[in-house]
Image: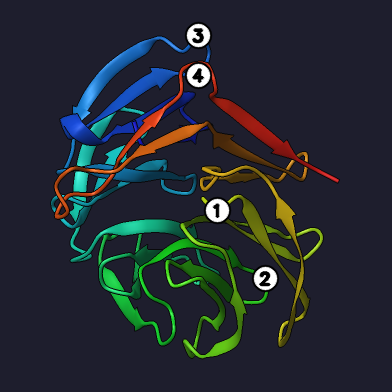
Amino acid sequence: MHGIALAPFSGHGFTSNGKENKVSMFSTADFSLIKKIEVGKGPDGIYDDPDTDRVFTNNHGSHDISVIDATKGEVVGTVAVGGDGEGAGLGKDGLIYVALEDKSEICAFDPKTLEVKRHIPLDGITAPTGLAIDRKNDRIFIGGHNKTAQVLDVPTAKALASFDTGSGTDAAGWDAKDGLAFISNGEGNITVIQEKSPTEFVALDPIQTQQSAKTMTFDNKTSKILLPAATIVVTPSTDPSQKPKKSITEGTFTVLVVGR
């Protein structure tokens, strides 16, 4: 399982199951499994759009996005983004903006018609993953694997500011109340960017978390950040052409809660 999305209108939850190319649909009332839904290959990130009551999965194997009716639990279409989607957010213009990790760009599509509207090349960001949006001021906060984060003006795609981040960047969140963007990474800290005005951005002191805590969500109701983490053991491969093996130490899984 890579991710989870909740659809409040329908009372359903959805998980993306990468290795079986399916999404599990469950009841948020008692967590019982309702069904498994066939989607594209290698579903990873998953998110809900309340306005359309649809759930979207970023499929890394088929380089597209599957669209699910959150009430019926049926696939109703596919978005041909042509890349591996990571972080996503709803823009001021009603489009969903998705970071394409393998293309180093952002793709924007209409969640109603499923038509791709924009491809925004990124200059200075490699392998973008974490993405958050300030809809009020039309700003995108995007972080990549080259330890860099940027703030973009959505209409012009112009980079307004650039900041250093840690290694293994994966997720981002936006606190509209306090004007703060958060970008988490597996190194064990969160980059914090303050939006002082629509054109002025400053980096605050990073928040120390835990190694492996690269995935996060921001809870708008409590103004808290939640990050899953665990102790990971890395075993080098005997074959130089293969990546090291990573395993989670049993009993170390936890959810970190960051607040003021």
Q: Secondary structure at mark 1?
A: loop
Say which label, 1 or 4, has the lower sequence index: 4
Give the residue drawn at x 66%, y 34%: 256
Marks 1/4: CA–CA distance: 32 Å
Disc 3: CA contacts within 10 A as few (<14), some (14-19) or many (>=20):
few
Please tell me which residue lies in front, 124 or 172: 124
Query: Which picture quadrant has residue 39?
Result: top left
Q: Nearer the viewer, residue 137 or 160?
A: 160
Q: Which residue is mark 1?
A: 187
Q: Nearer the viewer, mark 1 or mark 4?
A: 1
Q: Residue at x 40, y 9 (%)?
A: 32
Dot 1: few (<14), some (14–19), or many (≥20) neighbours within 10 Å?
some
| Amino acid type, callout 1 | Glu
Q: Which residue is mark 4?
A: 28
Q: Residue at x 17, y 35 (%)?
A: 21
Mark 3 or 2, nearer chain start = 3
Label 3 sits on a secondary structure element that is: loop
Of mark 3 and mark 1, the one earlier in the sequence is 3
Q: Amino acid at mark 2?
A: Lys
Confirm or deny contact between disc 1 and disc 4 (CB under 8 A): no
User: On the image, which quarter does residue 117 sit in?
Assistant: bottom left
Residue 37, quarter of the rendered image:
top left
- For the residues bearing labels 3 and 1, Cβ distance under 8 angstroms: no
The CA distance from mark 4 to mark 3 is 6 Å
The percent coordinates of residue 93 (x first, y second) are: 50, 72
* Secondary structure beneath label 2: loop
Residue at the spot of label 2 = 136
Name the residue beneath numbered marker 3: 30
- Which residue is rendered at x = 44% and y = 25% of the image? 12
The percent position of residue 231, horizontal first and vertical second, equals 52, 31
